[in-house]
Image (tube, coloured by chain):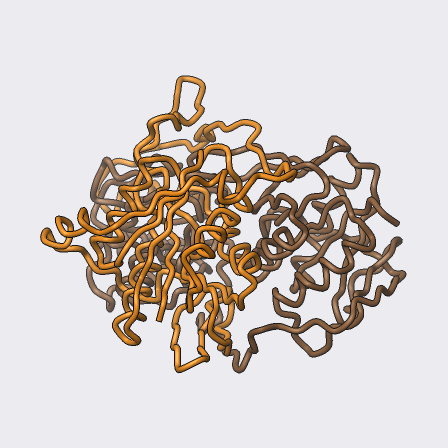
């Protein structure tokens, strides 16, 4: 089974600094593998251990994105494909078109796995767009994937229900974090990862921009906290009484 | 008929919310709102205007794949300036597929929609809610509207225009559907939410918080570790970026450290009160009332004080 996993080198929101005007400082901001992408890599590795084959990891982004590729390789993926593009300029559809072009070049793949959304911008758009652009079946928000021969049964986790879906190979899928517990690479695996091959492509070349203007970010600003930050002092009973008094005054106690 | 703003959601309630957002876009674009049904007509709310029925797809359920294909076919004929969908899980998928089919930009989970006549603008949270991004997309555009952000429109169309789009097939087939067991709790509509975090040491101790929630006529929620990692509560209780987004009158965070991903799901609450042993816990930055203390002492004290007051 040939398995493609798409990952993102996301801005680490916990480390993200704001300038004096409350704008995020994105140039040189610390990055990390998007949180839920670890579940996508893990699911790829699990499918490989059940069905043999190969796990190839794809990333679109700036040069630092190769760190995230290496992390996926340390977890056990076989090789990586790095697609160079400016993450601050491209929108979801551009990202998906670059991923689709890169996947086509080294494909065909039986399964293409993404996580449901990135931890930094969380649009959740790239996975279904990728399914469309690759022209394969797509199933979103999977919490369980079982592949048997040429078909697959997937459990989709929706807001209020779980949907069982049957689809056929090849297919693309996005996974939710409940699907598995991602493994931690060992030191040896981390060292071995640096020897695994990474192919480098240019996003603008493999997927020319065309005429779509896409979604642009006009401005970004932090939300000023409007919370009161009242520290309630005293022992448990005193603090409890003071809190209830305050909540009554706010009119939020039923 | 070209130049309209279309509204679609698989949920009629969400569809009515999206219709409100669409009115803001239509005003700026001098366009009309058209609420779309696919396959068979839905009831809707009475008012003046036109409902668009895309005929062809059959069956009781319209999957995101079918919705996207039907909308794409109709859009190629009728050229709406914008198609707005609700940002449910199925809605996000349908919107993304539609944008890919039409080759147009797709704005995700926006609020405060407007139009300058040439495109759509809207705001959305990024970086786990730390930052608000103002985004813009030229017409024609696909947009998902954050659920719960707009009131349901009251004047929805009463006249129906039918458009034949032909049979639409899905490569995947739904073979089963089960309701998630949330214990009858709907966190989205709860006025009071008591929410449990990693500070709760044992699963059994949740009953203490549940009891507090019941006393306060509220519902029990939790942060991600309790549902996803420990499995102490069903995931429907998970409040946060990838879980439920809530905005109760009172959010009582108990033993929750306050990671950005959690705050993203509750920051629109009217009043937030928190109990945590760590005075530097980030949850206090997102709180109106803060108690630095042991939940195992403060929660029983709260319970006693509440009983004494009733």
Reply above or below: B161 against A98: below
Taking the spot 85% from the left edge, 47% from the top edge, the residue there is B2
In the foreground, B141 or A68: A68
Q: Quadrant of the C terminus of chain B?
A: bottom left
Left or right of B258? Residue B40 is right
Taking the spot 32% from the left edge, 44% from the top edge, the residue there is B259
Q: Position of residue A135 (x, y in %)?
A: 56, 63
In the foreground, B144 or B69: B69
Tell me how many marks there are: 0
Q: Is residue B40 visible?
A: no
Q: Position of residue B204 (x, y in %)?
A: 24, 68
In the foreground, B76 or A243: B76
Taking the spot 28% from the left edge, 76% from the top edge, the residue there is A50
Chain A, which colour?
Answer: orange
| Residue that protrudes farthest toward the left in the picture | A188
Chain B, which colour?
Answer: brown
Q: Position of residue B209 (x, y in %)?
A: 32, 60
In the foreground, B263 or A76: A76
């Amino acid at each position: 089974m040939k398995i493609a996993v798409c990952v993102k080198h996301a801005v680490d929101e916990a480390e993200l600094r704001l300038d004096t005007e409350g704008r995020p400082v994105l140039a040189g901001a610390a990055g990390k593998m998007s949180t839920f992408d670890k579940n996508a890599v893990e699911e790829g590795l699990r499918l490989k251990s059940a069905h043999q084959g190969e796990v190839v990891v794809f990333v679109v982004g700036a040069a630092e994105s190769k760190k995230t590729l290496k992390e996926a390789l340390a977890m056990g993926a076989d090789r990586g494909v790095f697609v160079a593009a400016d993450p601050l300029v491209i929108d979801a559809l551009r990202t998906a078109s670059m991923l689709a072009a890169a996947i086509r070049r080294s494909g065909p793949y039986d399964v293409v796995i993404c996580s449901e959304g990135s931890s930094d911008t969380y649009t959740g758009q790239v996975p279904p767009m990728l399914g469309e652009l690759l022209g394969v079946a797509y199933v979103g928000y999977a919490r369980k994937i079982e592949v048997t021969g040429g078909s697959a049964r997937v459990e989709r986790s929706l807001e209020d229900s779980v949907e069982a879906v049957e689809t056929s190979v090849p297919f693309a899928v996005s996974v939710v974090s409940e699907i598995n517990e991602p493994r931690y690479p060992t030191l040896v695996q981390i060292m071995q990862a640096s020897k695994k091959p990474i192919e480098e492509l240019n996003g603008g070349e493999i997927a020319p921009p065309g005429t779509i203007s896409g979604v642009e970010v006009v401005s970004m600003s932090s939300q000023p906290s409007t919370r009161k930050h009242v520290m309630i002092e005293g022992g448990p009973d005193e603090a409890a009484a003071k809190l209830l008094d305050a909540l009554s005054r706010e009119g939020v106690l039923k | 008929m070209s130049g309209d703003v279309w509204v679609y959601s698989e949920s009629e309630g969400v569809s009515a919310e999206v219709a409100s957002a669409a009115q803001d876009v239509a005003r700026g674009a001098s366009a009309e709102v058209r609420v779309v049904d696919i396959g068979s007509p839905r009831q809707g709310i009475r008012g003046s205007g036109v409902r668009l029925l895309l005929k062809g797809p059959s069956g009781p359920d319209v999957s995101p794949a079918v919705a996207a294909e039907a909308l794409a076919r109709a859009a190629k004929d009728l050229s709406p300036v914008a198609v707005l969908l609700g940002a449910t899980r199925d809605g996000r998928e349908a919107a993304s597929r539609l944008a890919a089919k039409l080759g147009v930009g797709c704005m995700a989970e926006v609020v405060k929609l407007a139009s300058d006549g040439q495109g759509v603008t809207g705001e959305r949270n990024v970086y786990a809610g730390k930052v608000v991004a103002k985004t813009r997309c030229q017409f024609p555009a696909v947009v998902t509207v954050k659920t719960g952000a707009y009131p349901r429109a009251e004047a929805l169309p009463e006249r129906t225009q039918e458009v034949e789009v032909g049979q639409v097939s899905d490569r995947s087939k739904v073979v089963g559907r089960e309701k998630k067991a949330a214990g009858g709790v709907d966190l989205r509509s709860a006025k009071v939410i008591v929410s449990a975090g990693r500070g709760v040491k044992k699963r059994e101790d949740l009953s203490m918080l549940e009891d507090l929630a019941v006393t306060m006529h509220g519902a029990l929620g939790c942060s991600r570790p309790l549902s996803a990692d420990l499995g102490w509560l069903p995931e429907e209780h998970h409040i946060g970026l990838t879980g439920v987004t809530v905005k109760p009158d009172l959010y009582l965070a108990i033993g929750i450290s306050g990671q950005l991903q959690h705050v993203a799901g509750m920051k629109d609450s009217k009043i937030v009160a928190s109990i945590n042993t760590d005075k530097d816990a980030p949850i206090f930055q997102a709180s109106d009332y803060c108690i630095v203390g042991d939940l195992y002492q403060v929660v029983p004290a709260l319970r006693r004080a509440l009983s004494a007051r009733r």
